[in-house]
Structures are given as C-alpha cells and as structure tokens.
Image (cartoon, rainbow, N blue to C red):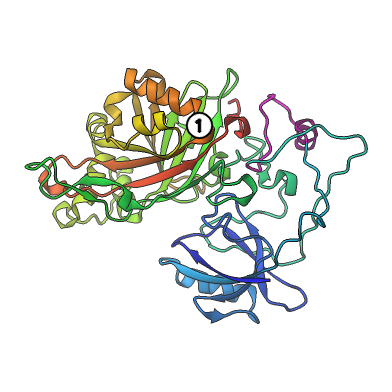
Amino acid sequence: MTTLDIIAPPGTLGIVIGHYPQGDGPFVKEVQPNSPLLGKIHAGDKILSIDNVDVRNGETNDVINLLKRASGVERKITILRVAPSSPSKSPRRSSISRRTLAGLVGSAKSPRSRSTEPGSHHEPDEPGQQHHFKPQISCHNVQDDDDEEDVNENTNKLTNGMNGLHLDQKHQHHIPTLPRFPVLETKDRNCWSEPPYSNFNIRGHNYLTDPKNKIPSGPYLFTARGADLILTNDSSGPSKGIAEKYSSILAGHARSSPTFVINFIFDWGILVNYFEIPAKYVCFLRAHYEGKKQDLPPMDTLQPHDRAIIRFFVGSDEHRNATLKLIPKCPDGPWAVRQLVNGKPALIGKRLPTYYSYYPAAGGLAECFEADLDTRETDRVGKKAISLCRRYLTSVTLDVGIVIEGTRASELPEQMLGCVRIHRLDPVMAPTLPSR
C-alpha cells in the first residue's frame, strides 16, 4: 500500500465519492472522463484526508463538503492506494473486438467505431474467449459539485472494456474525450495537459515603442477543460457549430459550465480545445448578445488583459480576426516539426477562415462562445505545418497556446488566455463525428 498526496486544481473535480459499507471510510468510486485528476487519482483509492483534515472515519458528505468549501483554490487530497498485483499473477483481461463492441452498443454505423477507453487495444475474439468485467463495489452514488452532473446509475452504461461510454437519446452515446496526462494505460499517448504558462513570451508594457519588449506570461486567464480529436467522413455531420449541434462532445460535459470552444477543422477531422470562461467575462457576453441588464464594471477599472478579452468577445468579426493569436509550439517530436512549429505567434483569423458563434444558456446548458478555424483554406506555410503535424501526429507533443493580442497601450501587457498540450495523438483511436 502507498500513501500519496494528490494536488487537485480549483473548480469541479469530476470524481464520484463512495463509502465502504463495512464502515472503512470514504473512497474514490469513479473518475469521470473529463476529470482534471484523470490518471492521478484512481477508482478504489481510499481517501485519508482533505487539506490535512482527517476523513478516514468520515461520511461521504464530509469529503464532498470539504472539497466544495475550498473549490476556488488548490486542494490536497491524501489517499491510500493498494499496489497493483504483479502481471504474472494477474488474470489476463480480454480485450473487446470492434464487432463485439458494436453488438453491445447496438449500432455499427461506421468501420471507424471505437471504444471509449482511450488507447484500448482491439484484437479478434478467440474461440471460447470470455470477457471479464470487474464487479463494482457497493457504495453510495454522490456528486462532487452541484453544477457537475454525476454519472446516472440508471443510464445505460458499459464498464471496463468500454469505460466511459454513456448512451443518450440524442446521439446514442457521448463522444469519447481525451483523458488528462499522465495516463498509465496508454503510456501517456492520446491525452492532454496544460504546459507551464511561463513557457510563453508575450507583449510587455512597452511593446508598442519597443518591439523587443517581450515578457513571460502570467497565469492562464482561462482554465483548460479538455480536448477532443474526432474524425469526420462523408456521413458525418457539420464540422462547424459543434457546441450547438453536439451535446455529446467532451463526453457530454462541454456546456456544463461557460466554455470557450476552439475548433480546428481539417480535411480528415476536428481538433477541439475547451476553456472555461471566468464569470467576469460571462456578464459582458450576456449583456452584449442577450441584452440582459448586467452590473458591468467600467472598462478603465479593469486589467489590460481583461479589456483585450472583453473587446474580443463583444467586437466585430474583423476585430476578432485581428486579435485572436495562436502560439503553436512543438516541445517534443521530430526535428523538422520542431523547427517549423517553433512558437512564432500568428494572427490565426488572418491566416484562415474563422467563424464565431455565441450560444446563450438554455435547457440546462451553460453559455458557450465558439471559434471555428477552417485549416483547409490556409496559406502555403500553414498547409506545410499542418501536413507535417498530421504525418507525425503519433510522435509529437504540441502546445496550442491562445492569447488575445494587445493592440493599444491600455491592453498591455498581454497575458495568455490558455493553452492545451496534446500528447502523441493516434487518429486510429479517435471516434467519428456522428451524422446529423
């Protein structure tokens, strides 16, 4: 057994807390696919303390209340983990073939149908082969946050070999999302993370008079929520406006909180990054797009980066195209990719067609602002970079940084809006966008 300290980021954690019926205290029943703790905390981990408060003899609600009480800051979760059995003594769990998976789900629309477990391996069923499913521990089903919908025990849910595949009425199943790094099962492939914000140099106070005035960025303004790699084909639905058309993206959680969606459209699929929009910007979106009366602070009382972001959200498409800046980096991969994708900023709206949409809160879904970037019509340099990245996608780590450019003194210094780092994605393992 090993005792570990897990540092949980601010916000919703996406974990389900249970309680052993024998009175042995609280434990982690389930880690949801979009949880920031995916790969760090595991189902079955016994919870010992929250921020050094002993909960070993506590109830489920004690743990939940402690996590909620400090939800605006990092929290330390101390857990007890039982060491896994050695491979030689562990029974071999059979993988599930595509045919078996299609039969269980009840649909086989495309030969690209995938398991919702990232990195799962498919092989033909062997004669007489049995699929072993691990029984769940009996425990209470609870939510870790009032705003985060828990996994409903009454929905149709396949477990283990199809872990995370939730059936819904609208799209038949939630589209599998990429787990957060690190992921032991895939050897850190097919996952995402947030690189250090200090990796990015952005415009400083005096940039307009001294173009060499670049400084390391402060903390990200938007928290990354996740990333999706989804294939498309002739029968797939539209690649634009996905936050409105597909409630199933980000494993069904894309609009569980106000979200900024960055959707890169390719010939073969889409790469979608999700960022949570802080409340101080949401009120400006509501006032501008919905005409709702909001108690808005005067612009001259805001920080420079706040002014830039608000003007981006409520400005014209022409203004957005002139200020939405992409900073792509390749920290790990073949030399040719690292040389081409080297962190040079690009006003992405001027390099390729970009479409912007705002969706107000409705039907239990939070507000969403979406930018669809159509890479199919980029310039020669862009096409070369995209071609290289596609060729080496399984062996590169890419940082997709976003910043709103400060074009006037009142908007400087800049600060990174956010960044998603994608780790060695394998399109073979990606799901396919369903038809509409």
Look at mark 1 in the image and give the residue it sits on.
393
Check if residue 108 falls in the magenta segment.
Answer: yes
Which secondary structure class fits the magenta region best? loop
Q: Position of residue 161 (x, y in %)?
A: 74, 45
Is 6 rendered above or below residue 233? below
Q: Is residue 262 shown left or right of residue 36?
A: left
Taking depth in this image into account, of 13 and 240 the one nearest to the observer is: 13
Tag 1: amino acid: Leu
Q: Is residue 321 visible?
A: yes
Q: Position of residue 284 (x, y in %)?
A: 28, 48
What residue is at 75 percent from the left and 36 percent from the top?
105
Residue 262, located in which quarter of the rendered image? Answer: top left
- Within 10 angstroms of label 1, few (less than 14), some, or many (20 or more) residues? some
Check if residue 396 falls in the magenta segment.
Answer: no
Taking depth in this image into account, of 188 and 254 the one nearest to the observer is: 188
Residue 385, located in which quarter of the rendered image? Answer: top left
Is 427 rendered above or below residue 274? above
Boundaries of the magenta span: 97-118
Q: Is residue 379 visible?
A: no
**What secondary structure is found at the residue carrying circle 1?**
helix
Q: Residue furthest right?
A: 128
Q: Position of residue 268 (x, y in %)?
A: 52, 23
Q: Is residue 11 shown left or right of residue 282?
A: right
Q: Is residue 211 shown left or right of residue 79?
A: left
What residue is at 76 percent from the left and 36 percent from the top?
101
Q: Is residue 404 shown left or right of residue 87?
A: left
- Image quadrant occupied by the C terminus: top right
Q: Residue furthest front?
A: 335
What residue is at 60 percent from the left and 38 percent from the top?
175
- Image quadrant occupied by the N terminus: bottom right
Q: Position of residue 108 (x, y in %)?
A: 73, 27
Q: What is the number of callouts on the image?
A: 1
